[in-house]
Amino acid sequence: MYIEKFIAMLPNDEHPLYDIGIVSDLGVEWWKNENANECNNSHSVSKAFFAAGIGILRDRGQLNLQDKVLSFFDASDLPDCMDERWQEVTIENCLQHKMGIGPECGLKGIDDATSRENIGDDFLRHIFSVALPFAPGTFRQYSDAAFYILSRIITKVTGQYADRFLLKELLNPIGFHECAFGLCPMGYPIAGGGFYARSDDVARLGYLYANGGVWNGSQIVSKEWIELSAANDYAWTPFRDTDIFVKTGGRGQMVAYSRSKKIGISWHGCCATGGNDRNDRYLEAFEKLLQEI
């Protein structure tokens, strides 16, 4: 199989590597550092799972990407005073991190150690109280807040917490083991980060996308949604000039897939420098592995 070949191609560095998962037509492979926990924080890789949840609901006709996010919430969910531009923010704007917030809005990471002290218990009310310096759809500012809104929309549409929905409609069907979602003080999944899982399970999502949304003969998410995600940066972005699509997470987390070779891959680790450089080197090794298959 593939995992031993991939590990042999990895560059040496001083940063901890916790586990690696590869899923292909040959099966599920998992390598784990004996000193690591079984489940690790995937950080922003979480966004790929909640984007898939939005895709499932879109496939079923339960929401539209051009729906205004405020249409899903009651007055009791919202602050008394809001920037009028929030009226124009769509689900697609959240998926693409184009809500209209700027770099000084303080919403990039709502799941950090000081969130409760700085935000309070009601994350949604805090997010909607922030002024939007840009018209929605015109400026990209990466933030966990965008996906927290999507988590709350999934809850409104389905009548169940978004993590429960994902467990039933996505994670269980593709064979996940133990996993956990970080929650806000009110019990809603943060969605932008805080997803704890094994890399062999996270890689299942990559394989699902590589396989056109089909798992064991069942269409979990539509091929159309996968193509839309790839074309419009709905959590997934291309790696350089390859057919590899990726979703990274802070400190060096990854889920990726190759459409041509139909393989999903994931890893967890901890890079104090942020992880982007090591992720690039590991993706280069993945690209080399794909060339040998």
Image (cartoon, grey):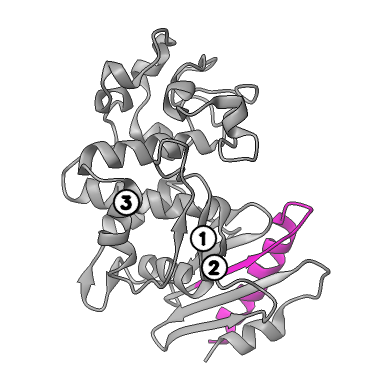
Could you tell me which residue is drawn at 33 percent across and 22 percent down? 77
Residue 260: horizontal and vertical position, in percent?
Answer: 44, 73
Residue 266: horizontal and vertical position, in percent?
Answer: 54, 69
Above-or-below relation of 242 to 7? above
| Residue of label 2 | 39
Badge 1: few (under 14), some or many (20 or more) residues near its Cα, within 10 Å? many
Whether the residues at callouts 1 and 2 have beta carbons within 8 Å, the answer is yes
Q: Earlier in the sequence, mark 3 or mark 1?
A: 3
Q: Quadrant of residue 161?
A: top left
Residue 104: horizontal and vertical position, in percent?
Answer: 65, 22
Magenta-span inclusion, residue 78: no
Dot 1 amino acid type:
Tyr
Q: Which is more toward the observer, 154 or 221?
A: 154
Q: Earlier in the sequence, mark 2 or mark 3?
A: 2
Range of magenta residues: 265-293
Residue 53, label in figure: 3
Badge 2: few (under 14), some or many (20 or more) residues near its Cα, within 10 Å? some
Could you tell me which residue is drawn at 52 percent across and 65 percent down? 256
Badge 3: few (under 14), some or many (20 or more) residues near its Cα, within 10 Å? many
Residue 196, label in figure: 1
Callout 2 secondary element: loop
Q: Quadrant of residue 180?
A: bottom left
Magenta-span inclusion, residue 282: yes
Dot 2 amino acid type:
Cys
Could you tell me which residue is drawn at 49 percent across and 34 percent down? 145
- Rounded to the nearest angstrom, the CA distance separating label 1 from label 2 is 5 Å
Dot 3 amino acid type:
Gly
Residue 259: horizontal and vertical position, in percent?
Answer: 43, 69
Count of numbered marks = 3
Residue reaching furthest to the left: 61
